[in-house]
Image (spheres, coloured by chain):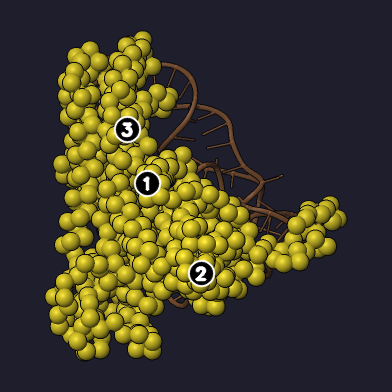
Amino acid sequence: MGQALAERLILNWQPPVGENGELLATAIAKRLDSVEEGASFRNAIRSLMQRALSVTREADFPAWYQAVVDQADLAETSPVRGCMIIKPWGYGVWELIQAALDRRIRETGHENCYFPLFIPLSFLAQEASHVEGFAKEMAVVTHHRLKTIDGKLTVDPDSALEEPLVVRPTSETIIGDAFRRWVNSWRDLPILINQWANVVRWEMRTRMFLRTTEFLWQEGHTAHATQADATEETLKMLEVYRELAEDILAMPVAVGEKPENERFPGAVSTFSIEAMMQDGKALQAGTSHYLGTNFAKAQNIRYQAASGDLEYCHTTSWGVSTRLIGGVIMTHGDDDGLRLPPRIAPHQVVIVPMLREKPEDAAILTYCDDLRNELSGMSAFGAPLRVHLDKKAIKSANKRWDWVRRGTPILLEIGPRDAANGMVTMIRRDRLRDGDKIISTAIPRSGFATTAPDLLVDIQRALFAEAKARLDGNIQTGLTTWEGIAAYFGAATEDDETGAFKGWVRAPWAKPTGSELEAVEAKLKALKLSLRNTPLGQNAPTGTCVFTGRPAVEDILIARAY
RNA sequence: CGGGAUAUAGCUCAGCCUGGUAGAGCGGUAGUUUUGGGUACUACAGGUCGUAGGUUCGAAUCCUGCUAUCCCGACCA
């Protein structure tokens, strides 16, 4: 029956020409036997639809990523190039990340404040290497008034600003300017501040959450009396980021120092946390910089030491951004959409009543209300459970899939029989399927609430364990020559959208600098590779540098990256 | 910022080559149907065809500018 049915299906339906139609036609051809004779085309398609998303990670990872952002209701594009509208579900995730990190920032002695969005152009010219290293693509404000000319609203040409204002790409310069005034004596130090803000970088190519023109972040800026204090601060915040990534986002990371060529412009040293995405690429998820006295000298941030001498401050800066959400998507997402670690899930438990617009609905709703109240009284991870009862008048059957795609950790479906029998039907998002089948478990309602917190803890742990195994299992350490590494990653011409999962390589190197490092960089770039970081806490190096052949100084991570 | 592609209903897309004032599926609404779960049927609603111009008796369709999106490259603090 298969072939004939397929032909009929395709004939009876006018598939959109192009990729979508071809994909569906291919799917039909592959899974004919699962289509029942006489089925309507729509049902046939649905029975063929294996997953809640139309794209799989394997088929097209970038398209899958876009699909998750869209279908999980995280964000959408805005009318302005490269900017995104972060929707409530996506913003809710950000707020939870924010809350967790903000608490740690305060616990480590920092205070929040706010600096202006506009930075005088001349400020950016203050630190030479900062200026040089920066991409010049920025948003610049040059006028301050609009005017109606010939009935059209335009920029008033007579309103040019004396000095253009740059929309902050980062705040080192304007905060340094304040530090200069705030710091006089050694008694004023350290200064430990943080700000939650938006920044703008006129990126050439944008991607939702990963690289957008405007994004949200947190930037910490500190000034210290000594190098030791500033270095300690840099590493302390790096550790805060590691903990945030691993404990809150369940996203394991490699913690290390960036090589010279990957440093923040003007920094003496830059440290990062790097996460492995499901396509094997590295994502720089947070950075912490020791800026030495470079900015202090450029901006004259000095203090009088106890000895009476004037000394330059040692400064630091560190930040993480909404990019973390991109990391969460590509770390935990699956072919049914997003999977959120419970600690950052705006709703940890969603109750979906199976309403039928019948009188018995009232009883189901009462049952669900009670269940919600009971669950809301519990707490997990030191905070009240976030429980949502989805009463929306959407077809109840569709609601399940909406919540699956959004990645809510625990989904409870309550039908009339559940309500009558005192049961709940539970779906765990981290263990959604057994093969193609959805795993839903009927559990007695009594006592369920008390076990829910443990369940959430277990889901958080399971997601981390899964990602940790992927990270640990995909860092190649056996490649000791450049030829071996090049062969491992394959040619740059290979389409890496469809290429096999490669992971990272950890290899010994001699930490070359200057032109020698540039040569290494060029070599890597030809294969679309880059140096990620040199993991902290390494054992004594062994072997020879894969680039120079000299004795190795340390191990460095090499990967394709976002 | 260079090269390529695209922009038509809420969504995915036909229609454009060969100009004659708009189509499908999904989704939505209403009714019937179904009732442990992405039901089925019928009907209805929904679009100044991204935007500004040009050519033409007439433009979704041909031409130009602009804007946005996607892919490749460059860039990526």
Q: Which mark is residue A383?
A: 3
Residue at the spot x=62%, y=62% of the render?
A119
Question: Between marks 3 and 2, how big is the CA–CA gap?
Answer: 50 Å
Quick one: quadrant of the N terminus of chain A? Answer: top left
The label nearer to you, 3 versus 1, is 1
Question: Between marks 1 and 2, how big is the CA–CA gap?
Answer: 32 Å
Q: Which mark is residue A308?
A: 2
Task: State the image coordinates of residue A467 (x, y, percent, origin top left).
Answer: 22, 54
Of all chains, the one bearing label 2 is A
Colour chosen for chain A: yellow
Q: For mark 1, what is the residue? A: A107
Residue at the spot x=16%, y=75% of the render?
A540
Does label 1 or label 2 sit earlier along the sequence?
A: 1
Image-quadrant location for residue A139: bottom right
| Camera sees residue A335 | no
Q: Label 3: state its secondary structure.
A: strand
Question: Between marks 3 and 1, how big is the CA–CA gap?
Answer: 18 Å
Indicate the amino acid at tag 3.
Ala
Residue at the spot x=31%, y=40% of the render?
A343
Q: Residues within 10 Å of mark 2 (few under 14, many from 20)?
A: few
The answer to which of A240 and A530 lies nearer the viewer is A240
Q: Label 1: state its secondary structure.
A: helix
Q: Which mark is residue A399?
A: none
Q: Is residue A237 left or right of residue A3?
A: right
Colour chosen for chain B: brown
Q: Label 2: state its secondary structure.
A: loop
